[in-house]
C-alpha cells in the first residue's frame, strides 16, 4: 500500500467498497420486462417480452396487468364507458413507457364507435414523438384540427420536442416560426426545448438568437435556458462568452445551480484556467451549493492531467468524506493519472477494485494496457488482455482490440492469438476469419499458433472442409507445424469423428520433420478408443510404448474401460507408474463398459 495521503484516502475508499457499498457505488439502469402486445388478459401474460428501461415513476408489472384487464372489461361493457375512462388507461400505459401498446388499443376504442377527444389525440401525439415518429404525430395533429379541437402549447411543445429528439433542429425551428406566424405565443418551455437541442448540436448562434428573441417577445428566460447556452459555450472552450452569460443571469436575478457551476468549471479546466476553476468551486460552496460526483470528477481528472497527483488524492479524500460515492469515471481518471506517472501499482490497485465490484469496462482495460505498454511492461499488458476472455469478457476484449486498431496501435502476435481464441470459443467464427484476414494484411503475419487456433475453431463449428483447406494452406506458405499444432488438429478431427483424416495427418508428421510426441500419441489413441476402434488403438499403443512414450491418465482410463485388450498391453502401460516408490496404483480390469 502506498504511503502518505494516498494511504488514508485509498483505505477509506477501499473500506467503503468492502462494507457493501458496491451495489450502489456504480449506478446501472434497471431493466423491466413488459408484454409486447395485447389481445386479452390471458394472452398478455404469455406474449413476448421486450426489455424496456424502467423509469423512476414506472409502475410494477402487476399494474400493467390491471390496466389491460380494465381495458378488456371496458370494451365488453354496454353501453361503453365514456372516452375519458379509456384515456385514463392509455395515460397509465404512457407513464409506464408502453407507447407501442397504446396505438392498437386506441384503434380498438375507435372501432367500437367511441370518438377520440382532445386528450386521447394528445396521448397519441406524445407516444409517437417518444418513439421518434414525429411525422405520424403531425398526422394526428391534422386529425385534431379537422375534428375542431384547438391544440394548446403543451401539444405544440410535444411536437417541437419530437423534432429535436430526432435531431431535426431546423424543422423544429421552422415549426416554431410557423407557430409564431399563426398567432401562437411560445412559452419558456418551447424556447428551452429548441435552445437545449440547438446547444447539443453545437448550434450556439441559433441558441443565442433564440435567447435574444425571447427577450424581444417578453418571454423571460430561466435557469434552464442560460445553463444550456453556458454548457454549449464551455464545450467549445468559449469560456469568456460563458462567463458573460453567467453575468447576464445574475443581472436578471437568476442564481446558478450546481449544473451551471459544473459546466463553467469544466470549461475553465479545458482551457487550463485552473485557478479560476478553483475560485468558482469555492464560490459555489460559499453559496451552499454542494458539488456532485460530476463536479469532483472534472477537478480530479484535471489535477491528474496536470501531474498534481497529491492534490488529486486530497480531492478524492474530500469527496469520500462528504459521502459522495466515486463513479467509473472517477476510477478511470485515477488510473489514467497513475499510468501517466508510471505508478502502475496504484493504477492496478484501482483497476482491481473495479474488477471486484464488477464495473471494469473496455475503457478501464484500455487505460491499464496502455499504461503497461508505456512503462515497457509488455508482458503485464499482454497478461491483462489475456484475462478478459478467461473471465468471460469476450465483448470487452473485442472492444479493447478495436480501440487499439482505431488508435493506430499495432497488436502483437499474442494479442491477435488471444482475440482469435476468444472469438472461436464463443462461436464467432466469421468474425475470427475477418480478424485473421486483417492480420494477414498487417505487419504481424499469422504463425502456426494462429493457424492452429483458427483450424480448431473451424473444426468446433463443423467446418471440416474449411479447416482442411486452411491446413493445406499452412504447408503451402512454408510454415512447419509443431507437435502442439498437430495434436490440436488431430484432437479436433477426432472429436468430429474424422478418424481416417486424423490418422493421415498423424502419419504425415514424420515426413514433415516433426515426429509425434507423447501428447500426439495419446490424442490419436483416445480418438480411436472413443470410437471403439480397438485394433487401431492397440497398434498405436504398442508403437507409443516402443518409442518410449507413456500413456496419460485419460488413455489409461479408456484402456481399462475397453477391457478386451490383453493383459500384456495393460501391464506395459502400468510399468512406468510402478517405478515410483510409495505409489499405490490399483488396477481393476473388470470395469463394465
Image (cartoon, grey):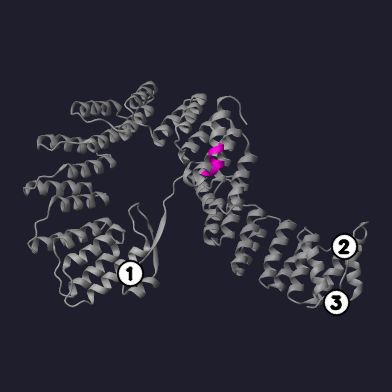
**In the image, is residue 19 part of the stretch drawn in magenta?**
yes
- Give neighbour class at mark 1: few <14, some 14-19, many 20+ (Cα, 10 Å): some
Helix, strand or loop under label 3: loop
Checking the image for residue 547, the label placed there is 2
Please state the extent of the stretch shown in magenta in the rendering: 14-20
**In the image, is residue 206 part of the stretch drawn in magenta?**
no
Q: In this view, does 580 lie above or below 410?
A: below
CA gap, disc 1 and disc 2: 69 Å
Helix, strand or loop under label 1: loop
Checking the image for residue 590, the label placed there is 3
CA gap, disc 3 and disc 1: 62 Å
| Mark 3 or mark 1: whose residue is earlier in sequence | 1
| Mark 3 or mark 2: whose residue is earlier in sequence | 2
Residue 589 at x, y percent in the picture: 86, 74
Helix, strand or loop under label 2: loop
- In the picture, the quarter occupied by the N terminus is top right
Q: Is residue 153 above or below residue 261?
A: below
Whether residue 20 is visible here, answered yes or no, is yes
Residue 419 at x, y percent in the picture: 57, 52
- Residue tagged 1: 37
Nearest the viewer among 255 and 499 is 255
Magenta stretch, overall SS: helix
**Left or right of residue 115, residue 64 in this image:** right
Nearest the viewer among 57 and 374 is 57
Amino acid at each position: 500500500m502506498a504511503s502518505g495521503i494516498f494511504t488514508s484516502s485509498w483505505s477509506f475508499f477501499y473500506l467503503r467498497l468492502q462494507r457493501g457499498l458496491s451495489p450502489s457505488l456504480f449506478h446501472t439502469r434497471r431493466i423491466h420486462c413488459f408484454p409486447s402486445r395485447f389481445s386479452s388478459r390471458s394472452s398478455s401474460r404469455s406474449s413476448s417480452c421486450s426489455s424496456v428501461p424502467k423509469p423512476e415513476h414506472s409502475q410494477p408489472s402487476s399494474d400493467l396487468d390491471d390496466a389491460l384487464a380494465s381495458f378488456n372489461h371496458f370494451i365488453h361493457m354496454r353501453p361503453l364507458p365514456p372516452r375519458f375512462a379509456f384515456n385514463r388507461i392509455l395515460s397509465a400505459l404512457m407513464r409506464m413507457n408502453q407507447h407501442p401498446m397504446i396505438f392498437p388499443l386506441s384503434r380498438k376504442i375507435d372501432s367500437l364507435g367511441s370518438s377520440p377527444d382532445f386528450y386521447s389525440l394528445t396521448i397519441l401525439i406524445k407516444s409517437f414523438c417518444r418513439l421518434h415518429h414525429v411525422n405520424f404525430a403531425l398526422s394526428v395533429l391534422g386529425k385534431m384540427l379537422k375534428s375542431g379541437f384547438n391544440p394548446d402549447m403543451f401539444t405544440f411543445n410535444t411536437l417541437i420536442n419530437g423534432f429535436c429528439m430526432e435531431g431535426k433542429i431546423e424543422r423544429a425551428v421552422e415549426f416554431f416560426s410557423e407557430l409564431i406566424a399563426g398567432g401562437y405565443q411560445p412559452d419558456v418551455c418551447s424556447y428551452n426545448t429548441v435552445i437545449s437541442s440547438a446547444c447539443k448540436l453545437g448550434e450556439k448562434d441559433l441558441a443565442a438568437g433564440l435567447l435574444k428573441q425571447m427577450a424581444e417577445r417578453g418571454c423571460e428566460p430561466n435557469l434552464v435556458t442560460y445553463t444550456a447556452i453556458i454548457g454549449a459555450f464551455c464545450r467549445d472552450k468559449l469560456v469568456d462568452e460563458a462567463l458573460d452569460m453567467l453575468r447576464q443571469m445574475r443581472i436578471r436575478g437568476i442564481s446558478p445551480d450546481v449544473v451551471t457551476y459544473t459546466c463553467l468549471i469544466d470549461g475553465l479546466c479545458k482551457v487550463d484556467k485552473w485557478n479560476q476553476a478553483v475560485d468558482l468551486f469555492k464560490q459555489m460552496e460559499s453559496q451552499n451549493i454542494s458539488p456532485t460526483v460530476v463536479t469532483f470528477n472534472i477537478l480530479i481528472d484535471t489535477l491528474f492531467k496536470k501531474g498534481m497527483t497529491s492534490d488529486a488524492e486530497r480531492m478524492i479524500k474530500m469527496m469520500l468524506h462528504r459521502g459522495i460515492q466515486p463513479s467509473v469515471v472517477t476510477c478511470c481518471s485515477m488510473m489514467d493519472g497513475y499510468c501517466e506517472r508510471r505508478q502502475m501499482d496504484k493504477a492496478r490497485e484501482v483497476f482491481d477494485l473495479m474488477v471486484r465490484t464488477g464495473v471494469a469496462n473496455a475503457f478501464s482495460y484500455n487505460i491499464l494496457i496502455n499504461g503497461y505498454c508505456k512503462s515497457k511492461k509488455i508482458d503485464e499488458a499482454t497478461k491483462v488482455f489475456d484475462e478478459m476472455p478467461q473471465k468471460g469478457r469476450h465483448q470487452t476484449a473485442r472492444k479493447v482490440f478495436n480501440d487499439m486498431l482505431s488508435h493506430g496501435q499495432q497488436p502483437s502476435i499474442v494479442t491477435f492469438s488471444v482475440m482469435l481464441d476468444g472469438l472461436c470459443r464463443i462461436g464467432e467464427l466469421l468474425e475470427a476469419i475477418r480478424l485473421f484476414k486483417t492480420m494477414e494484411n498487417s505487419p504481424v503475419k499469422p504463425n502456426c499458433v494462429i493457424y492452429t487456433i483458427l483450424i480448431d475453431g473451424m473444426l468446433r463449428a463443423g467446418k471440416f472442409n474449411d479447416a482442411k483447406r486452411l491446413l493445406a494452406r499452412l504447408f503451402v506458405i512454408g510454415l512447419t507445424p509443431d507437435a502442439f499444432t498437430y495434436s490440436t488438429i488431430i484432437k479436433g478431427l477426432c472429436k468430429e469423428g474424422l478418424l481416417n483424416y486424423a490418422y493421415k495427418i498423424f502419419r504425415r508428421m514424420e515426413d514433415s520433420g516433426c515426429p509425434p510426441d507423447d501428447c500426439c500419441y495419446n490424442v490419436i489413441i483416445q480418438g480411436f478408443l472413443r470410437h471403439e476402434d480397438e485394433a487401431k488403438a492397440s497398434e498405436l499403443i504398442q508403437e507409443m510404448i516402443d518409442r518410449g512414450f507413456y500413456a496419460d491418465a485419460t488413455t489409461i482410463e479408456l484402456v481399462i474401460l475397453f477391457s478386451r485388450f490383453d493383459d500384456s498391453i495393460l501391464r506395459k502401460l502400468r510399468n512406468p507408474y510402478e517405478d515410483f516408490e510409495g505409489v499405490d496404483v490399483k488396477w481393476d480390469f473388470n470395469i463394465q463398459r
